[in-house]
Structures are given as C-alpha cells and as structure tokens.
C-alpha cells in the first residue's frame, strides 16, 4: 500500500498527461469475438495486421501509433450496433455524444446504438478518460469507424444487387436501391457473415453542416434510470454474500504503524480482519459492524513531525523545489526586454490546494473466482486500475477484469485505484465479494488534490501597450496552460515542481486553472499600467482568431462598454486549453461592508463543431459554477499531516445560493473539428472575478481562493 | 422484504424489530435502533436510490421524505423513522410512470453524473407539495442543502419551475 507516498501519482498533472505506450497484447481473437457477439460486421482500429495476414490473433498495437485511439463497432446480425470503448461516463454525457456521432455516420436513430464502456475484458485498451480527449480522439475514431461500417454495408448492398453505389440511398438503417426500389437493412446484410475491417482514414465522413443526429441536443441516453433512482453506481452494488469493507487509516500523513492488535475486532461475529504489512482492514456483513470492528482495533502509530501547514505552504513550496525544471518557451532575451521596458510589472500569485469532491466517493466491489479478480470501481482509468491490481496481486492482466459502471463524477480526481485494491485484498481473504466505499472524510484525506503553487510574473510593457518581456515561473501547480498566447518577443516560461506535502494530481483544467489565473490577472494589471481598457489591451496583443472571437463574443453579450453602477466592477479573462477557447466577463458588486457579490458571469465558449448544444452548455455552466468555488472560497486546510476540513460542513463547495446570473454563448464552428468541452470552461472564472474586484475597488487580490470569508480584507 | 440473516442478527443484543412504513408498504426489519435510516434503506432493504454523500447532513444526497418533510437519512436514526410515512425516490414512480416532478427533470435534461439526482428530486417534491408555485428565491432557499458538484443548479431550478407550471 502506498497511500503515504505523496510524490508519486500515476498521472502527474500536465507534464505527463499523454499515456505511456500501451504494453499489452489483446486476448480477444476473431473466433472468440464472434462467439461472444454473434456474427456481423466489426470495424476496429487494431485489425490491420489481422486483415492483411489472415492471422487469427489481434496483434499488439503498433507502438509507433500509440497516440491512436482504439475502439470497435459491431453491427450485429439483428442490425443492432454496439460500440466498444475504454472511455467511461462520469457525467460528461459522452455515452450520449459518442452515440450521436456513431448514429450520425451509420444513419441510424440514436436508440439503435449501445455503448459498451470501460470494461477491460470487452473493450480495447484506453489510457483513460481525461484531458478532454474523448471528443477529439475517441469521437474522431468512432466517426471514422462508423463511416467505414456504413460504406462496407453499402458495398455489400451494391454487390447484392449488382448496382453502382450511386444508385443507393441510405436512411434509418436501411439501404434502398433507388432504381429498383428494393430495400435491405443492415442486419440482413451482415447475417451469417463474420467480417472484420480496419478503420479507414480516408472514408468520407458527414460534414458537420449536414448532421442530423449529431449537432442536436439529444437528451442523456439513459437519463430515466438516474431520475428514478434505478441506476446502480458501484457504491450501490450488492452481490450475493457480499461483505462491507473498511480500512484502518493513519492518524496523519506518513505515520508509521507500530502495532495493531486486531483480536477484539476478530472476535466480533461475522467479521474478517486482514493484516498484511501496513494494510489493516476489516469486512463484515453490514457497514455498521465493519465500522465497529475497525474501532475495535487497537493501533499504535508513530507520527512524523514537522509537516508544513496552510500558514507556511507557499514559502515551503518555494524552498522545496525538486529541481526537475520543465521549461516552456524561451524566446529572445527576457532580461533585456525587462530592463528596456518603459513600465515594469512584477507580481506573485499563490494558489491553494483544492479538492475535487466527487459526490460519489471512491468505491469498489471486488470478487475472486477461479484465480481471476473482477473489480467494479468508479475510475477514470479502468486499464490503469487493472494494471495497479495486476501489479499489487502479482497477476497477469488477463486475470484482472475492471468494470466501470457510470460513475458519480470525477473531475480529474478519480485516476487511481485505491478502493479497488482495498476491496480486492479484503475479498481475497473473505473468499466472498467485498465492497469498499470511502467515507467523505477518507475521500478528502486519502485521495489527491489539485496542486497548490506559487507563480511569479515579471513583465515589461511599452506605453503603447506592447508587451516587451514576459517572464513566468510556476512553482508546483503544474505545466498545463503555462505558455502565453499574448505576443512578446522576449519570453521565459517555466514550471518548477516542488516536493508537495499533499498528494496531488489532475483536476478539471489541471494547472491551467492556476496558470490562466496568474496570466489573465497580470494582463489586466498591465492594461491598467498603460491606461488601456483590458479588452482592448488583450486584442492588441493577440493574434489567435479563435481566442479573439470568444473574448469579443463574451464582451458583446455582457455589455462590456455599458456604464456600471457605483461599487460595481467588470472583469474579463480568457484562454484556451484542451482545444476549448473561452472568454469570460464578470460583474461584481462590493458593498460598503466590503462584502463581494458576483452578480453575473457571461461566457463565450468555442470547441469546434458542437456535437450536443444542450450538454455543452450544461458542461460550460457546470465549469463556471465549479470555478466559482476555487475562485472564491475553496481551500484545503491542513496542519501536522492532517486535513482539517475533511467534510462537507467544513469544506465549502458552491451551492444554489452561490450561483450568479450565468449566460453562456456557444460559438459553433462547423468548419472545425469537435474538441473537448469539459475542462476549458473553468479557466476564465477566477481571473475574471479578480479583475472585476480590482475594477470595482482598486484592490488586486493575488491568492486563490480570493475571498475565503466572503469579505475583502 | 425481511432482513433475516439468522446467526448474525441474533448475535447483536441491541437489535430491535421495527416496522417501517415505506413507499406505501410495511417493512419489518431487525436492526440496532441507532443505525442511520440511509444504511437500512440501502443495505437491508436494497433501496439504493438514496445516496451517501457526506454522512453529516451537509450535501442532501440522502434526502428522503418523512411525513412529507425532507430529512437527511444519513443522520436520522432508523428508530426515528419507524411508524412514520417514509418516501424515497423509489416511491415517487407509480406503475412505472414517473411523478410529475421527475418528468420535469427528464424534460429539462438536467443532470451530468446524476449522483445528486435522487436527493434533488425528493427535495423538489417536498417543496412543490408545500408551495406549488415557488419563486426562484423560494427554490434556492428550499434546495440550498443539496449539493450538485457538477453544477447543474440552473437546470434544477428550471426543472422545478417547469414542474410547478405543469
């Protein structure tokens, strides 16, 4: 168990977001596949060697193509279409959007598509659902796969009727011979066949402007199950004979277990206890008994002293750099640019650690049968958790199956498999299935956080608003969104990791939430330094049309030019991240008692051709609201290796009463590929609020969260 | 439905037999009286629509109705619910037909991860029963104990307004 190693996380933010190359070999062969699925037509990415060699085994993916995304689509003998993907549904509504993409290309209604997601026995390897990669990568791959399938079906029909493709019309899963009026549906064409095809890169796909199923606000596909309480999340699962597991936690980070007397716990009827090295856990027929058993364990710990706390964290991060400097861009001579500037700017921003707080905490159900381990768990990386389990229990990966039912959110916070390992260890001993559901306190304490950090900005600007130098150093909060889009001939940009005292990892928008905050605050400060309007200053220093477009769209809808009430302020910010471009305007009111109210947020968002406008708007609004928390009041309080606000009564997240008036403007670029939407919409919120407060009262706040107590100091 | 896991039940001296009037039916359970109602619903009665989110009545994911009032079932001892009328999300749907408030949430296509859905809908149902045409202010006040971490609040408000107008 490595829950005390803060430095190592399978996905360090930003620096290593791309997966390592897949080290796997598919166990699914052609015969097995069709035995499993029935006959029909399969279109997959990985089958190229299979098709060319006639070999029956699907070969390992070509390492040179590690960035390519695997998925396959099966058109069954009954015409049903199943899509197999390693992506998981944690609330992004990709079960719906990917179905739309496939339905569009196959010219089928949405209801004909079944998505098989995140089951390591059934779907091809996938590095994980993160980095807003589902739509640009998996979406693109599935679009091509579905189009390949459609063209293959049309070719079968053309052959059947001995007629050219131009005489065929395809609609609603049926191909019509426009000359003879004969009809055939997909099921009839695939009946009795076992066709394997490789996804074609050159297949014609339907242009976004002609979409009929994609590009529309299709409702969440299985919404009724959620609204009626019927959907079974992992935390809801109950298998025959299943026990409820609990794990003994250290009183503070890096505490060493000296001894644990488990005799009393063991004597409770129905309880099993596992003590294996530092791991001590119990399982019982109900959760109440499991908790009693855990409390009955007499454990002695040696706690480490000298942990940093909130009081000194920023100083600590600056002093404890780990030396692996990750340089972004260096161009020109930044020192010369600074010294030659008419006006100089220098500022330091502090970023607190914040928690993801997925409403469903980590949960897993594990079951051993015939030497094979099956785990259901809510994770964004089913194959990553499969690997963790295989390593932990010294199993071949084909002896580990991980399944991810649609999960109660992640926001980048569920990349790891802690609960899966704990449930598996307990189930191994219990010889029956065991479920482990973390308490909220455990989720706050033993998961991981968005990194805290310190960002130093030094810039020079000429009186006409030209940026002459841009020096940007991020300590520990990560490299995503590090580079600037603003023109400057002299730049020096770096990310310096520190030895973090808290376990840290990915978050929605990753480090861009910190880097964009520091950059967009500084840009507004520079504008004020030269007496320019913050929007005009941005437009002068940008040449990215998409960035300019969202800033202008937001400003126009917001009424940036309109006069404001006394005590009110306007702020603007923006950026692009993970393919999404965002411009955000905020109006705040500061009362005479220095109470700050965010009155409204107007945000323009552009991520290429929109696949589902309603769900996109929902993601954008959700990002804005989540962003409000990190901007205004969310912060992890810690001291002596303990989290001091590890509960929802102490750690404040946005509620109904925190929501300002929100307007989202979606720019639909049908001429551009669809990109991710779940992350970038968060990045403009914090700097826009900070800039609005500055505009209202002339006070520049440089620490996130801006107003932990709601009042300006 | 009965919880009759023989040896285990008998081994707990504090266990009591209680009757819960739940979603229009009586359920006899044998359980320690101070076990949270949420645990009994989920573990003993396999009604998992009500969710665990915080264990301290701070997030609303476990919201059920007792005699028509919203209650955080994670901090309500089961003994406090015995003999009263308990309604969970599973009790809203009648003959596979969604209640009007559920239908309004469905039409509005509110949710992302949906883990908060049951609690939100139960809180909304209680509000609408007491105040069939709530103002936005009244909605915010009534719903403020329920957290949606995905931030779908504006859609929840829209769905409640739709339910109140239909």
Image (spheres, coloured by chain):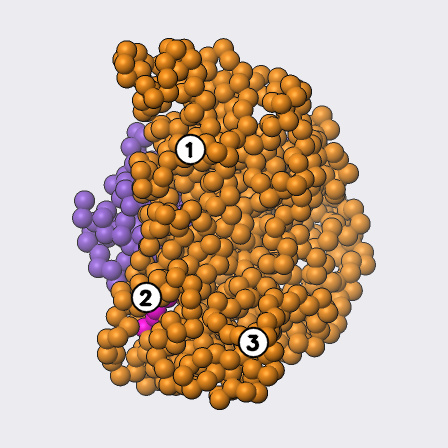
Chain colours: A orange, B purple
Which chain is disc 2 placed on? Answer: A
Classify mark 2: helix, strand or loop: helix
A408 versus A50 height, above or below? below
Figure quadrant of the C terminus of chain B? top left
Residue ID at (55%, 21%): A196
What residue is pinned by disc 2?
A552
Look at the image and say whether residue A209 sits in the magenta stretch: no
Give neighbour class at mark 3: few <14, some 14-19, many 20+ (Cα, 10 Å).
many
Q: How many marks?
A: 3
| Res. A692 visible in picture | no
Residue ID at (81%, 56%): A259
Classify mark 3: helix, strand or loop: loop
Q: Is residue A302 left or right of residue A638?
A: right
For the residues labelled 2 and 1, say whether their Cβ atoms are less than 8 Å apart: no
Mark 3 or 2, nearer chain start: 3
Main SS class of the magenta portion in the image: strand
What residue is pinned by disc 1?
A204
Look at the image and say whether residue A586 sits in the magenta stretch: yes
Viewer-closest of B117 and A551: A551
Mark 2 or 1, nearer chain start: 1
Q: Magenta segment, which residues?
A: A583-588
A385 versus A582 height, above or below? above
What residue is pinned by disc 3?
A490
Q: Nearer the viewer, mark 3 or mark 2?
A: 3
Which chain is disc 3 placed on? Answer: A
């Amino acid at each position: 168990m490595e829950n005390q190693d803060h430095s190592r996380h399978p996905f360090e933010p930003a620096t290593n977001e791309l997966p390592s190359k897949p080290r796997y070999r598919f166990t699914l062969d052609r015969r097995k596949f069709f035995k499993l699925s029935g006959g029909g037509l399969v279109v997959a990415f990985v089958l190229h060697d299979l098709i060319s060699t006639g070999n029956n085994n699907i070969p390992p993916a070509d390492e040179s193509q590690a960035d390519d995304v695997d998925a396959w689509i099966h058109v069954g003998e009954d015409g049903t279409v199943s899509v197999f993907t390693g992506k998981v549904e944690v609330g992004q509504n990709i079960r719906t959007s990917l179905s739309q993409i496939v339905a569009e290309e196959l010219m089928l209604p949405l209801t004909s598509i079944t998505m098989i997601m995140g089951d390591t026995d059934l779907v091809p390897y996938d590095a994980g659902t993160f980095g807003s990669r589902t739509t640009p990568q998996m979406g693109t791959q599935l679009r091509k796969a579905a189009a390949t399938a459609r063209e293959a079906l049309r070719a079968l029909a053309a052959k059947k009727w001995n007629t050219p493709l131009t005489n065929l019309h395809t609609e609603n899963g049926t191909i019509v011979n426009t000359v003879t009026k004969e009809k055939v549906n997909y099921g009839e064409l695939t009946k009795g066949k076992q066709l394997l095809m490789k996804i074609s890169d050159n297949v014609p796909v339907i242009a976004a402007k002609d979409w009929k199923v994609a590009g529309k606000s299709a409702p969440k596909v299985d919404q009724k199950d959620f609204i009626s309480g019927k959907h079974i999340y992992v935390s809801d699962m109950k298998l025959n004979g299943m026990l409820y597991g609990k794990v003994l936690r250290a009183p503070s980070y890096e505490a060493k277990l000296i001894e644990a007397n488990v005799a009393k716990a063991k004597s409770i009827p129905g309880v099993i206890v596992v003590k294996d090295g530092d791991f001590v856990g119990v399982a019982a027929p109900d959760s109440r008994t499991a908790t009693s058993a855990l409390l009955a364990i007499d454990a002695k710990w040696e706690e480490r002293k000298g942990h940093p706390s909130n009081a000194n964290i920023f100083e600590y991060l600056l002093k404890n750099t780990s030396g692996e400097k990750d340089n972004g861009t260096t161009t020109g001579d930044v020192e010369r640019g600074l010294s030659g500037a008419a006006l100089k700017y220098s500022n330091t921003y502090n970023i607190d650690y914040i928690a993801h707080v997925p409403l469903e905490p980590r949960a897993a159900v594990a079951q051993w049968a015939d030497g094979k381990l099956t785990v259901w768990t809510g994770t964004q990386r089913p194959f990553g958790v499969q690997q963790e389990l295989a390593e932990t229990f010294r199993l071949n990966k084909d002896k580990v199956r991980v399944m991810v039912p649609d999960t109660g959110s992640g926001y980048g916070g569920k990349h790891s498999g802690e609960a899966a390992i704990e449930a598996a260890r307990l189930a191994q001993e219990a010889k029956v299935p065991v479920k482990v559901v973390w308490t909220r306190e455990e989720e706050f304490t033993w998961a991981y956080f968005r990194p805290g950090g310190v960002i130093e900005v030094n810039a020079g600007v000429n009186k006409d608003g030209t940026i002459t130098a841009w020096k940007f150093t991020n300590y520990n909060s990560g490299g995503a969104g590090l580079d600037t889009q603003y023109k400057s001939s002299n730049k020096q940009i770096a990310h310096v990791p520190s030895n973090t005292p808290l376990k840290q990892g990915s978050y929605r928008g990753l480090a861009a939430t910190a880097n964009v905050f520091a950059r967009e605050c500084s840009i507004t400060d520079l504008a004020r330094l030269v007496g320019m309007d913050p929007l005009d200053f941005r437009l002068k220093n940008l040449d990215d049309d998409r960035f300019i477009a969202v800033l202008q769209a937001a400003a126009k809808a917001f009424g940036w030019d309109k006069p404001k009430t006394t005590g009110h302020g306007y702020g603007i910010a923006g950026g692009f991240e993970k393919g999404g471009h965002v411009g955000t305007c905020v109006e705040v009111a500061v009362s005479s008692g220095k109470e700050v109210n965010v009155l409204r947020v107007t945000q323009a968002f552009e991520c290429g051709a929109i696949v589902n406008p309603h769900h996109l708007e929902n993601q954008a609004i959700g990002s804005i609201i989540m962003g409000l928390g990190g901007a205004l009041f969310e912060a992890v309080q810690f001291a002596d290796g303990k989290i001091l606000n590890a509960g929802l009564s102490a750690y404040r997240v946005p509620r109904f009463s925190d929501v300002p008036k929100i307007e989202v403007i979606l720019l639909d670029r049908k001429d551009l590929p669809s990109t991710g939407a779940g992350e970038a919409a968060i990045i403009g919120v914090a700097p826009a609020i900070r800039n609005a407060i500055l505009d209202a009262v002339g006070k520049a706040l440089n620490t996130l969260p801006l107003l932990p107590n709601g009042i300006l100091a | 439905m009965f919880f009759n896991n023989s040896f285990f039940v008998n081994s707990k001296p504090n266990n009591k037999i209680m009757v819960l009037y739940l979603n229009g039916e009586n359920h006899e359970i044998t359980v320690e009286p101070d076990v949270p109602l949420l645990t009994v619903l989920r573990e003993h009665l396999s009604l998992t629509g009500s969710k665990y989110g915080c264990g301290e009545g701070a997030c609303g994911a476990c919201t059920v109705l007792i005699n028509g009032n919203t209650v955080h079932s994670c901090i309500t001892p089961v003994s406090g619910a015995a003999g009263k009328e308990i309604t969970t999300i599973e009790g809203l749907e009648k003959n596979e037909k969604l209640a009007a408030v559920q239908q309004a949430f469905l039409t509005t296509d509110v949710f992302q991860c949906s883990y908060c859905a049951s609690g939100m809908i139960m809180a909304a149902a209680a509000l609408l029963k007491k105040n069939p045409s709530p103002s936005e202010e009244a909605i915010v006040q009534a719903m403020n104990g329920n957290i949606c971490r995905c931030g779908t609040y504006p859609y929840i408000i829209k769905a409640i307004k739709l339910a109140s107008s239909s």
